[in-house]
Image (cartoon, rainbow, N blue to C red):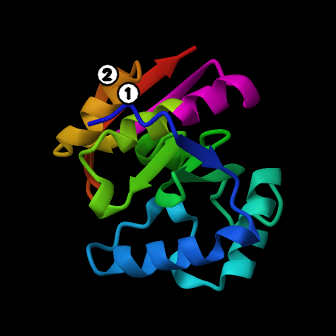
Amino acid sequence: MTNHDTLRIVFPTQSHQALCEAFIKEVKTHDNDFQATTGLENMAFDAWLARIKNYRRGLDLPKGFVPATTFLAIDNGWLVGFVSIRHELNPFLAHIGGHIGYMVHPEHRRKGYATKMLSLALDYVRDACNLKAVLITCDQANEASKKTIIKNGGVYEKTIHDHKHGIVEHYWVRF
């Protein structure tokens, strides 16, 4: 595992279309967990770009959604993952989803990318979102996510038992 000094989170632009489309195609062959992509797997890239720009501004949000910023995690020209930062919590996010969601390409998992991605997301939240603390959740069985959250200062709060989403742990990072 390296320290990933070259990893950056960036706002998606038209220049990222080929990277994003290849990512989605490859991930579909491994799993169907697209929580941090804000729907890219189901729509044209241009429409997705417009959607995430609006969501960032709090515009055209579907019922139950909150303003959110989507980032691409890029390391040396490779798209290794997505990060979604919700600017506030609604009842669902306070129960299950939290402020920050992220996904790492299956080929890049267990290499330290999630830890660095979450660190960069927390830097953004601290500097740009005016939040004093963020809730980060993970499935109780996901040991890798627990370690990632704890390495980034997450403090365990509680465990939620949800009939639809299973057992979810809550961690808080305070600034």
Is 106 or 83 nearer to us in this picture? 106
At horizontal 43% and vertical 67% (from top left) the residue drawn is 34
Q: Is residue 39 above or below residue 121?
A: below
Res. 77 visible in picture: yes
Q: Secondary structure at mark 1?
A: strand
Residue at image mark 2: 156
SS for callout 2: strand
Give the mark, 1 or 2, whose residue is nearer the N terminus. 2
Q: CA distance from mark 1 to mark 2?
A: 4 Å
The x, y position of residue 76, in whole percent, is 51, 52
Give the answer, above or below, for where 33 lies relative to 72: below
Q: Camera-side residue: 11 or 60?
A: 11
Quadrant location of the C terminus in the rendered image: top right
Name the amino acid type tagged 1: Tyr
Residue depicted at x 36% and y 66% = 33
Q: Is residue 164 visible?
A: no
Where is residue 75? Give x, y as percent.
50, 50
**Span highlighted in magenta in the image:** 120-137
* Total numbered circles: 2
- Any mark on residue 92, and which? none
Query: Residue visible at 68% across and 74% down?
Result: 48
Residue located at (64% from left, 75% from top): 17
Residue 175's place in the image compared with 149, above or below, is above
The spot of residue 105 in percent (x, y) is 36, 61
Instruction: Answer whether labels 1 and 2 touch (C-beta < 8 Å).
Output: yes
Residue at the farthest front position? 76
Membership of 125 in magenta stretch: yes
Residue located beneath label 1 in the image: 171
> Looking at the image, which is closer to me, 10 or 167?
10
Q: Is the N terminus in the top left, top right, bottom left or bottom right quadrant?
A: top left
In the image, is residue 92 part of the stretch drawn in magenta?
no
